[in-house]
Amino acid sequence: MIEIDAIARAALEALDDARSVAPLTARFGDFTLNEAYEVLAAVHARRGARGERAAGRKIGFTNRTIWAEYSVYAPIWGYVYDRTVKDIAALGGVFPLAGLAEPRIEPEIVFGLKAAPEPGMDEAALLSCVDWVAHGFEIVQSIFPGWRFTPQDAVAADGLHGALLLGPRAPAADGDWLAALPRFTIELKRGGATVERGNSADVLGGPLSALRHLVELLGRDAVHPPLAAGEIVTTGTLTRALAVAPGESWSTKLSGIALEPIAIRFA
């Protein structure tokens, strides 16, 4: 029988210490994806008991172009917290990487919800539940050396979430988001030089499609609550995730969508 609490304790201790550990599936025996989400619930409960508040969810592995790189062939999700979500402007454009294990950067589209979306909604109905749209960087991390893990390991480690750095929020009521979100392109730059390019359609057909996927998953979930008004949802990387290091400056260039580019320097 899988020891849910033991796995959750080991995962959270490694996350807290930014410490590399063997994959949990190697240490505790194989466990299913459903059991991994039970571990995630136990990790979430432990974080809540020490005062952390969930701010929303992150969806991982929505970008189909990176599935073969990680041997993960379907999206997963995890929680984001009040202690891990930051406004880039409030940070002064600088974010410290201390406390993160093998951090990588992912440019993403983020939604702020004003109403609870429901299973079966089409993208127009989902958009009506959105208060604002933003461009952000998710800083993902791997407590598993060399980014080698199973999907179950990734889920148990809170979907590999490290931090979510938000750019300016644009009102969802303004602009033609239904047309723009599935069709825009992005350049990811390091030190002013383009190192990756991406298309929003790679994210399950577009960020709203990624949101719909999460809503449907949670609609069948007996352990975790559905999305609620006030939650933030970040929808998955628009490019490959690339390693970051202190001293580096990263930025984006967007084409085909009315969102401002963002920039961050790592300390």
Image (cartoon, rainbow, N blue to C red):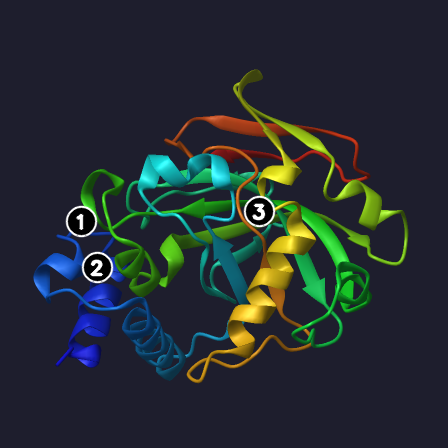
What residue is disc 3 on?
91
- Is 160 on the left-hand or right-hand side of 240? left
Which of the marked residues, 2 or 1, is nearer the chain's N terminus? 2
Residue bearing mark 2 = 14
Circle 3/circle 2 CB separation < 8 Å: no
Which of the pair 147/75 is nearer the observer? Answer: 75
Whether 196 is drawn above or below 129: the answer is: above
Label disc, if present, on residue 20 of the rendered structure:
1
Q: Amino acid at mark 1?
A: Ser
Q: Quadrant of the C terminus?
A: top left
Q: To which quarter of the image does residue 230 belong?
A: bottom right
**Dot 2 amino acid type:** Ala
Counting the numbered discs, the total is 3
Q: Residue 184 location in percent, x, y?
A: 73, 34
Sequence-wise first label, 1 or 3: 1
Residue 128 in the image, given as x and y percentages of width and height: 82, 66
- Tell me where residue 76 sits by quadrant: bottom left
Amino acid of disc 3: Leu
Q: Quadrant of the N terminus?
A: bottom left
Label 2 crowding class (10 Å Cα cut-off): few <14, some 14-19, many 20+?
some
Q: Which picture quadrant has residue 10?
A: bottom left
**Residue 241 pos. (x, y %):** 44, 36
Q: Determine whether label 2 and label 1 are within 8 Å by CB.
A: yes
